[in-house]
Amino acid sequence: MSASPPPAEPAGSPRSRHEIPLAALAGSAAFFAAFLVPLIGVVGVPLAAVPLVRLAHRQGLAAAFAACGIVVGLLLGLGWAGGGFGAGVGLALTALAVTALPIASVGFLRVGADPSRCYVGLCLAGAALLAACFAAAGNGPGASLTAEVGASFDRIIPTAVESYARSGADAESVARMRQTLETAREFAKACLWGIFGSLWVVGGAVAFYLGALMARPVPTADAARFETLRVPAAGAALFVAAGAAFGLLPGEGRRLAANLLLPLSALYFVAGLSIICHFFRRWFRVRILRVGLYTLASYFPINLGVALLGLFDWYVDFRRRGEGVRESS
């Protein structure tokens, strides 16, 4: 994929002076809501970057990073007031990573980089940052993130099992539920980096592509269309290598391979969903129907097929073949 010419700078508008504080307030609200409302959870975190990515497309990187600074400052103050200085710093640093990296990806778009590579670069940057955080937490004086997750499961499992037993479930069902929760605990402890990496890959797609969608019509935003996403062929080789390592290596090597496979699988699920989006936008004009079909594609085992679609696209090129079939019919 060759780099396209640098898109033109977005023109300023009379309302530009209002867009920075509005984007900062919207991002702060979405980010903080993720910690206040459990139902929002991880959905609110990538949504926090959307107004800032939109601002980067419309008003440039300086305006977007200014709004990012406001978001970080607000969350530092709110976290400090609610849980002390340490909690405020942790919340602010998280907000900085979640918002600054997607903004930076727009900067590469503005110098003519391929949009798909910008998104993949965003995924790699987030994964590297997560790896550094896990390494720092593992070597720090306190308990590691893995240990904290295991302790959380140890507190939750007895309460959940007792509540399920009191609801009238038979002993076999209670034992099966306990086994499921204990399996989930061991999986989370072994693959915590991979789980967070997968969430970053999916959340990065939300921030990168939804932010561009909301910024249109702007040249850089028009270039970043979800239905045109293509993962470089090197990703398939890395996926195959990680799969082989997971199947052949014992112990720690197998665990590391599993942690690599999870975000790669999420990346190819997003890529497969972009292929589906490419055709759905042509075949189904009713937007609510498309949203329902996208939701259906996220359920197991359909999501496995979607990921395989994205994995083999580098070889098959489903979009080109699909257009050829349509033209000949």
Image: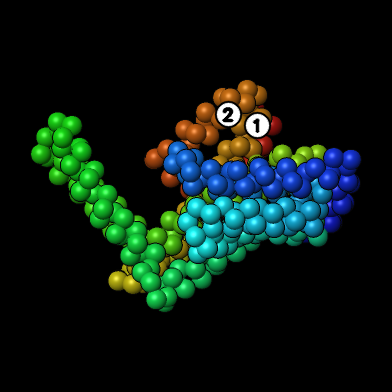
Q: Is residue 62 visible?
A: yes
Residue depicted at x 82% and y 49%: 59
Q: Nearer the viewer, residue 299 or 137?
A: 137
| Residue drawn at point x = 29 percent, y = 59 percent | 151
Position of 122 with respect to 300 (left or right) is right
Residue 281: numbered disc: 1
Q: How is the image coloured?
A: rainbow
Q: Is residue 298 left or right of residue 47?
A: left
Point 61% across, 32% down: residue: 280
Amino acid type, residue under disc 2 in the picture:
Arg
The residue pinned by badge 2 equals 290
Mark 1: give few (<14), some (14-19) or many (20+) Cα within 10 Å: few
The Cα atoms of the two marked residues, 1 and 2, are separated by 8 Å
Residue contact between numbered discs 1 and 2, judged by CB atoms under 8 Å = yes
Q: Is residue 4 left or right of residue 71?
A: right
Residue 10 screen position, x and y as percent: 86, 48
**Furthest-top residue in this view:** 286
